[in-house]
Image (cartoon, rainbow, N blue to C red):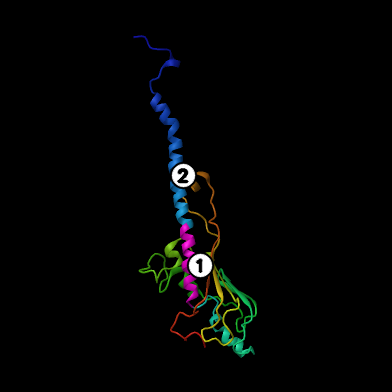
Amino acid sequence: MRRPPIWRDESGAVFAEFAILLPLVVFVVCGSIDFLYAFYQWNAAAKAVEIGARIAAVSDPVAAGLNRLSNQAVIDGVTPGAAIPGFVVTCREQSCTCTGTCPGLAGNLFDPVAMNRIVFGRGSTACGDATSYYATGMCDVLPSVTADNVVIVYRQTGLGYAGRPGGPVPTISVSLQNMQFKFFFISALLGVNFAIPPMTTTITAEDLCSGRIGSCAS
């Protein structure tokens, strides 16, 4: 039997088509996996700041002594019952700074124990060991979170008063910074990393005390 000319020979055509399509199929599958994993991380980051803000609202502040500021204002001459002078305390990367009027707050106020409570959860110093929602910290939701990624801002907005037994009532903003998506394939193939957009949750403080009622107000 005479063989057809080489330009009409169709033997092996399936393998040629497979070789052409295989890279595209691999790219689509790997890209889909990374996209879904990135979406999970984005959603986890949003949930992590919500959890961090909730813990911060009912725990000792990362700025040590902030929960006694309303009583300190009275000691410094503010009339009991009057508005607490405005302040903004920002805690990030192992330090806290205050702008405005912060009676009794000076130097490096950063409390690593209070920050760890927000990052790791109540009664924990590691990620992934939470046994209940109450004990869940930020890194239990997103394991890549560290204390250096967390920014906490306490802002006096007119709530509370000088001499209030429960301390001041600032609004608390918890944010994530300098975080990158973790990919299975894209980073290795393209050699690039992508930043997770900044995430922030703001909540009103309730009782800035991790101990029994009234134990932090003196």
Q: How many marks?
A: 2
Kind of residue indicated by mark 1: Ala
Q: Residue at x 42, y 27 (%)?
A: 16
Query: From the image, which quarter does the N terminus lie in?
Result: top left
As drawn, 178 above or below 1: below
Q: Which residues are magenta?
A: 43-59
Q: Does the magenta-highlighted stretch encompass residue 54?
A: yes
Q: Does the magenta-highlighted stretch encompass residue 50?
A: yes
In the rendered image, is residue 116 in sight? no
Give coordinates of residue 128: x percent, y percent: 39, 64
Tell me the crowding category of disc 2: few under 14, some 14 to 19, or many 20 or more residues within 10 angstroms, Cα based.
some
Say which residue label 2 marks: 31
Give coordinates of residue 38: x percent, y percent: 47, 52
1 or 2: mark nearer the eye: 2
Give coordinates of residue 171: x percent, y percent: 56, 73
Which residue is at the front of the view, 45 or 11?
A: 45
In the rendered image, is residue 138 in sight? yes
Kind of residue indicated by mark 2: Gly
Q: Secondary structure at mark 1?
A: helix
Q: Secondary structure at mark 2?
A: helix
As drawn, 211 above or below 95: below
**Prevailing SS of the magenta stretch:** helix
Q: Residue at x 40, y 12 (%)?
A: 4
Which residue is at the front of the view, 151 or 87?
A: 87
Residue 147, numbered label: 1
Q: Residue at x 45, y 79 (%)?
A: 210
Give coordinates of residue 100: x percent, y percent: 65, 77
